[in-house]
Image (cartoon, rainbow, N blue to C red):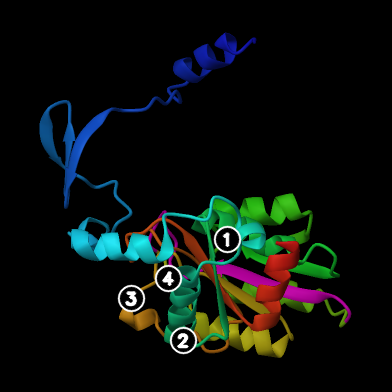
Amino acid sequence: MMFQEQIDLLQQKGLYRSLKTVGYIDRQYIEVENQRCTNYTSNDYLGLGQIAFDKNDFEKFMRKYSYHLSSSRLISGSSAAYEEIETMLAGWLGYSACTILNSGYDANLTLFNIFKNTNCVVFSDQENHASIIDGIKLSGLEKVIYKHLDIADLEKRLAECPNQNIQKIIISDSVFSTNGDVVDIGQLVSLKHKYNATLILDVSHSFGIENYSNYQGVDILTSSLSKACGAYGGVILSSNDVKDMLINHG
């Protein structure tokens, strides 16, 4: 394999990356090269991923549900434990259905697959997360990129697509991970109603924040569980019809 030249080029440009070995992780601290350092890289915002658990409770849970079903939910069946969590999350945020996936990244890749066979255009903020960009690209959907947080530019582009037979999909992060910018959800909801669009928000960086517990008017939410929940996985909150499509075409 002829990779060495590419690796050399990455090193010359200062873009070469390698895995750094670390030791223990203790709350906000991490051991690096035998030194106790403050960890600013963790996604576990609230430290919930490191809360001690009762071993007896864990053993009871494992005896009841087992570790895993050794296959996908469609093949071996859907664990009652997953369904309990999905019902809880859907009820908490006011949605009819919730679907747990491998990660927040997978949630966005999966979601756009269900629009493949529809006549639609996706209107995406230019600073949206890479998983949104990849999801749109891999699904082959037509896209329109609007200026970052520029509601006027978004409306202009929506107005340029007057065909009522084309489904308009607006997609945005709620809080943008690279700079902390916050979207005005109310303005997006207003545009959604005005142009008969579907509104999707990736709420990975606002999930669990009290000020972001009301998503009325937002059709679909996607999120990682690694931030506020300190867990591995992702979710899509939606209507029952969308969940059915995720199961069959996601």
Residue type pointed to by label 1: Ala
Q: Along the polypeptide, which appears first: circle 3 or circle 4?
A: 4
**Residue at x 62% of width, y 69% of height:** 171
What residue is rendered at 64% in x and 10% in y?
Answer: 2
> Mark 2: few, some, or many residues within 10 Å (few <14, many ≥20)?
some
Residue beneath the point at 44% across and 23% down: 16
The amino acid type, in three-letter code, at marker 2 is: Gly
Residue at disc 1, secondary structure:
helix
- Which of pointers 2 and 3 indicates the residue nearer the eye? 2
- Where is residue 182 drawn, in percent x and y? 42, 70
Quarter holding the C terminus is: bottom right
Residue on which the image places disc 3: 209
Q: Choose the circle earlier in sequence order: 2 or 3.
A: 2
The amino acid type of the residue labelled 4 equals Val
**Residue that label 4 marks:** 182
CA distance for labels 3 and 1: 20 Å
How many marks the image carries: the answer is 4
Mark 3 Cα within 10 Å, few/some/many (few <14, many 20+)?
few
Camera-near label (3 vs 1) is 1
Residue contact between numbered discs 2 and 1, judged by CB atoms under 8 Å: no
Dot 2 or dot 4, earlier in sequence: 2
Say the numbered circle drawn on residue 107.
1
Q: CA distance from mark 2 to mark 4?
A: 25 Å
Q: Which residue is mark 2?
A: 91
Q: Quadrant of the N terminus?
A: top right
**Front one among 161 and 40:** 40
Residue 135: quarter of image: bottom right
Contact between marks 1 and 4 (CB within 8 A): the answer is no
Pointer 3 or 1: first along the chain: 1
Q: CA distance from mark 2 to mark 1?
A: 19 Å
